[in-house]
Amino acid sequence: MVLTGLVLSQASHPPCSTSLPAAPPLSKPINPFKSPRLPSQIHAHLILTGAIHHSASLHRLSLSCNSLLRSLVNLNLPFTALLTFSELTQQWNFSPDRFTYPSLLKACAQSSSSFEGRTLHGQLLKLGLAGDSFVVGTLISMYASCSDPQSAMAVFNQTGGSGNQVIWSSIISGLAKNKYPEEALRLFLEMEETHVESDEVTLTSAVSACAELKDLAMAMKLSSAISKERRKSSAVDRAEEMFEEMPERDLAARVRSSNSIVMLETAVVDMYAKCGALDLAKKMFDEMPERNVVTWSAMISGLAQHGRGEEALALFRTMLEEGSVAPNPVTLSAALSACAQTGDLSSGTWIHAYIVRSGMSFTAGLRNSLVNMYAKCGSVGAACRTFEVAAAEKDLVSWNVIISGLAMNGQGAQALETFRQMQREGMKPDDVTFVAVLSACSHSGLVEEGRRHYGSMEEVYGIRPKLEHDGCMVDMLIRAGKVEEAEEFVRRMEGEPGREVLGALLSGYAVFGELRRGEVVARRLLREVQPAQDGSYVAYCNMLKGRGRRGEAKRIREMMEERGAKKIPGCSTIDVDGVVFEFFSGEGLGQELCELQS
């Protein structure tokens, strides 16, 4: 649909003077339909349904039409709002004003109608309204919603940084949503310097940007602003008794305020979790008077992602016991990840049954989480059955998960056959796929096939091998006893070998007793590659002790302690009546055995 009035030419588009990289233009066509009675019909319908609360006639056209357009947008009918505006201007000689455009720009944002939004911007420029603070915020939000942060920045820059809270909030939120977290945080700090007070919406955007960057130092800088906003929220809570005594209550405003602070606190939980500050995340989580499913999901996911699977599952069980919030696919995926991490097949199977009983639809992500859980818990058959049920819903991640699962369970031949099936079905592999494929070749001793797949990465698929792929190749050659060929492969590498490659080489030297060569690699690994893996220290220590050089091995152990590297002990788990027992190497078994026997 072409809006009546002015259609923007390229020359009349607002300038995009910003350092952000250019984004491709977006436009979603609108299917037009003609009806001269449309405005009257919609207006009458909105009055009858209570969507607008006055019966102004169409003779009071400006007020009535603005109310009509605003109501359509509030009812999430953006295409109807834009079409109605077109009909109003053509059939009813309606002249839009500064109160008309925010609704129209919101309609463009809702429908990602970039072309129509630019057309409206052109009208604003010609009417002299483009600098009106009432419309600038919605103009920025429109461009951001249409994935055009460059134009959003251009509009913001025209304010000279003197905008109000709404304008600042619009640009910070827009940049954060479009994956420009550094710019979003930079502007948030600028806003604070100009003494424009942030609200919970602005702060939520800044917190989300910080979470995207996993910047704990910035997270701590935001903590004072977060505390201030939460104190304001507490003051609002204390005013609730006064609110209850009011003769007319704006219940919608109260709900919006409550939702905003929950969103902020949830974003803070997510930020701390992604930054690795799990204790701070849990403290915020525990202090929240109200939690929604996103809050629970963020906390459970954060624990699972940082190796605290048992705590994640305990929190998931608490969520189910409280019963105030039902888990969604994101929550369940996080819980399944925790099951995979702890090897808790019993809980993973229960979650699978819960999904079926609840009638929840199996999203691709949820099904992939199930396949991953079954594979990492060693139930290869269940993983394959769950994968096959997906049929047409299989995406690239689905194939990567099942191929990796088969490879890690020693089913190299089946993993490679699955990879060939994936190719037959027209799915193009990515770099993650080839890590799984090369790992399968390594564990199955298929050196020639591994070489062929490695060579095809760049030649056939245009995928440049990464250090993970190089590490798989070195590991494969070492396992096959081709130590000299592994060394030659490392020498031919274009870049510096990382810890994946050097670690695989060191492990090979340890297996074949190549102490002299192993010492060279070990010293380089411990000196140049940070953080060195604990396995590197252990392999070097074992090599030294095997040659009777216990004093040197002791010094390496001391170096481990100085650098904070810890040897991860071997661990086995056993599930007894739904309770998972863990046994670590070097620990006494007396108490655990008594518990099992009882």
Image (tube, rainbow, N blue to C red):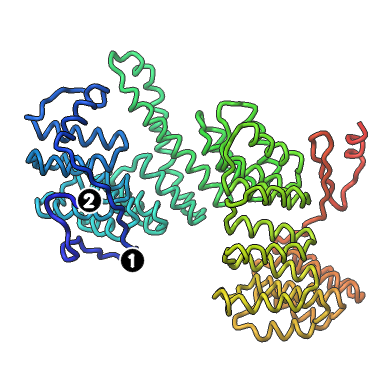
- Residue 358 in percent (x, y) is at 61, 31
- Residue 401 in percent (x, y) is at 66, 56
**Quarter of the picture holding the C terminus:** top right
From this view, report whether residue 240 is shown above or below residue 567.
above
- Residue 352 in percent (x, y) is at 68, 39
Packing grade of label 1 (10 A; few <14, some 14-19, many >=20) is few
Q: Which residue is mark 2?
A: 1
- Is residue 504 visible to us here? yes
Left or right side of 380 for 121: left
Q: Which residue is mark 1?
A: 22
Type of amino acid under label 1: Ala
Type of amino acid under label 2: Met
Q: Secondary structure at mark 2?
A: loop
The residue at the point 70 percent across, 78 percent down is 451
- Is residue 169 visible to us here? no
Q: Secondary structure at mark 1?
A: loop
Q: Identify which residue, 524 or 256, lies in the foreground.
A: 256
In the rendered image, which quarter is residue 185 located in?
Answer: bottom left
